[in-house]
Image (tube, rainbow, N blue to C red):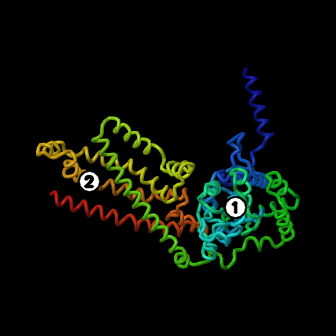
Amino acid sequence: MIGAVIVVILLSAGVLRAAGPEPPLLRWGGDAEGGAPFVEADPADPAKMRGFDVEIASALAKDLGRRPQFVQVAYQTLDQSAARGDFDIGLSGIEDTPARRAALAVTVPYFEFREVLTVRAGDAGRFRSLSDLRGRRVGTLAGTIAWEALVAAQAAEGVVPVSYDDDVHPYEDLAKGRLDAVLLDHILAARSLKRVPGLATQPTTIATGRYVAILAKENAALRDRIDGILKGMMRDGTLRKIFEEWNVWDDEQARFEESEIAAHGAARISSNESSPSSPSRKSSLSLVISYLPSLLRASLVTIALSCLAMALAVVLGVAIASGRVYGNAPVRMLLTAYVEVTRGTPVLLQLFVLYYGLSGFVKLPAFVAALLGLGLNYAAYESEIYRGALEAVPKGQLEAARTLGLTEGQVLRLVRGPQAFRLALAPMTNDFVALLKDSSLVSVVTVVELTKQTAIFATNIASWALPGALCAALYLAMSLPLSRLARRLEGRWRAASA
């Protein structure tokens, strides 16, 4: 028995020596939500990723003598995660921009894409270019080259840019009539045509861009090694084979690779030196001046949405609380179910259901859907505050009021209601401040409020430091006066009742 154990130990030691230490990891970041052909979970095994960026990452890891390990990162935060060192290299259809090159170590481009317009098939004859879309809503991903093109077209052509957090819902909204066109990469457009019927993509190229990989600024040495590998993959046909496998290789990509191979000697200069006019070279003051108007406009959207949603929540909350206190058993049961379901499910899910889930029956405008989503959600919380406040009024006062001949309506309006309102004021104020911050969620239904505009700002300059500080200052400027007003009212009522 002991001899067998010794043999097993010796064999294990031999195996370990033969296998040797495992190679180090190459941690690469991407967003699986972006889907194929970039990065997506393999339907056969969701624990594994597939896509042409996945294969490129594997090829890079192999040539570097490392093992690839995928790190899930939201697309909008890939730059910040790269700068923080959350991964070694980012690959997920990342666009080459001057701001990105100024803030990060960026590789040579490995794919060239075209920005194309997608419209409903019935509109293909009249919406051929951005100039045909004056006054029309055109959707795209925020913080991309396409978004910058739409912002420029807004001034020159009069189009109305609509921002999205993903590349799926723009095409669905186009098919449903919420948009008149979508401007995105030709790869995304081709994928969406297969998924959403009734659409057509115009052949005209609105703009061109290139995909790159990103690393932290201090990883320039690793970036240089990866550049050499990528150039080798272009020369030996490895990249072409990967792109052909994912059906994204075409004549345009062939010409791009030929030009990159021909110019490989100058690639370091042309690819990784940011232009003097890069946004990152601007002073902090000039950045604030250029972006502050858009942030202020977004703040107005946040204020309007929050105030209207809170007004709706207060009205519905009073009605629900009154029904639960004064209603019969079926009414109380129904209202209790509403409160529990609403409080027990995320507001983000409720926004998706209102805007996208109900679109087959009623196509709510984005602002209306956001208003209803926040208002209906917070009505459930407000109703609990009001119900607790109503029940906190001493029963002796209520019985005295009834003894004096007041009806239940008069008791509520003259005795119970005013005292309950005083008790509910502080938590109401807290809820309004919370709603003000939760309004940042409505960007998922294409409403550009303060946080979304800040995210666009941060993406454009590849930094969250200055945009985040400005956003925080604006939120404080909106919430602090409300808190002071509530404290002043509480002080007055306390003095009056003393």
The residue indicated by pointer 2 is 421
The location of residue 393, given as percent across then percent down, is: 21, 46
User: In what element is the residue under mark 2?
Assistant: helix
Q: Which mark is residue 118?
A: 1
Amino acid of disc 1: Thr
**Mark in front: 1 vs 2:** 1
For this rendering, which residue is in front, 52 or 71?
A: 52
Q: Is residue 389 visible?
A: yes
Mark 1 Cα-neighbour bin, 10 Å: few <14, some 14–19, many ≥20: many
Locate the C terminus and report the quarter of the image it occupies. Answer: bottom left
Q: Residue at x 86, y 66 (%)?
A: 258
First in residue order: circle 1 vs circle 2: 1
Is 480 above or below relative to 315? below
Q: Residue furthest left?
A: 404
Q: Is residue 361 above or below residue 103?
A: above
Count neighbours of disc 2 (C-alpha within 10 A) and say few if under 14, some if 14 to 19, many if 20 or more: some
